[in-house]
Image (tube, rainbow, N blue to C red):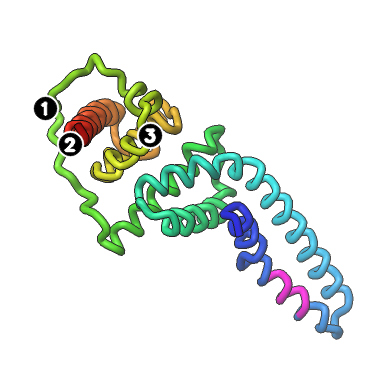
Amino acid sequence: MKTTDLIKDSLNHSSWRRGFLQDASETEDFESEPKIVKFVVVKKREESHAKKEELMSFEAVMLPHLDAAHNLAKWLLRNEQDAQDVVQEAFLRAFKSFGGFNGSNGRAWLLTIVRNTSYTLLKKSRVSALTIPFDEEIHASGHESVSPATILEHSEDAELIREAMEGLPSEFREILTLRHHEGLSYKEIADIAQIPPGTVMSRLARARAKLRECLAGRIGKEK
């Protein structure tokens, strides 16, 4: 079953739907107060209709960003099954909180949830060290004349890039994915990662430098 189908199935079988069916059944069996029963049943049906409309609205706003959510989770977790699980969990969390979403940038909002869910899994499984001491005054050496976009998007060896990125710390994988794979602005990345825009720029510079270093090392070994 595809990830999209799993998400839709999970949303369709969420607790509010089960609760409605159970409550409606119990209410219809209560025959001593017909007027009250009719009112409650109608109210339940109206609530069900509202929930269905909310679900349709959620799917329209959030499902277009499924690929971006999966891409971020995959690069953070480096495991396809874990990425699918995290995306499904993130969509369920997003649906539960959708009533409070009043912004226009659904992708950034969803990716924030995906990011937080991914890091929660990383902490539980202790896959990698999540806290790396960053010194804003330390700048990686560098060859800034080489375009990071060229490294990430126009290299002839995509597999080499993938392997190099997988070897980077999670913070670097995250920021490279958000900037160069998803094309997010510094402000959007700052909102998602919950860091100042200045930190986004300095961390991105270090991530690019580290990626170049890893690529140079791998290319050197292959020669």
Q: Is residue 181 above or below residue 50?
A: above
Q: Residue furthest top?
A: 145
Magenta segment, which residues? Answer: 19-25
| Residue 198 visible in the current orientation | no
Q: Secondary structure at mark 2?
A: helix
Give the residue type that dot 1 points to: Glu
Q: Which residue is mark 2?
A: 221
Q: Residue at x 49, y 58 (%)?
A: 89
Query: Residue placed at 61% from the left, 60% from the top?
Result: 1
**Residue 32 visible somewhere in the drawing:** yes
Instruction: Answer whether residue 82 is magenta in the image.
Output: no
Q: CA distance from mark 2 to mark 1?
A: 31 Å
Residue underneath mark 3: 158
Query: Between tags 3 and 1, which lies in front?
Result: 3
Above or below: residue 197 compared with residue 172: above
Looking at the picture, how far across and down is residue 26, in whole percent?
75, 80
Which residue ends up furthest to the front in the rendered image?
223
Left or right: 170 with respect to 187? left
Q: Secondary structure at mark 3?
A: helix
Frontmost residue, 28 versus 194? 194
Quadrant of the image occupied by residue 136:
top left
Residue 137 got which mark? Answer: 1
At 16% from the left and 37% from the top, the residue drawn is: 134
Callout 1: 10 Å neighbours few (<14), some, many (20+)?
few
| Rendering coords of residue 222 (x, y %) | 21, 35
Q: CA distance from mark 3 to mark 1?
A: 32 Å
Dominant secondary structure of the magenta stretch? helix
Q: Amino acid at mark 2?
A: Lys
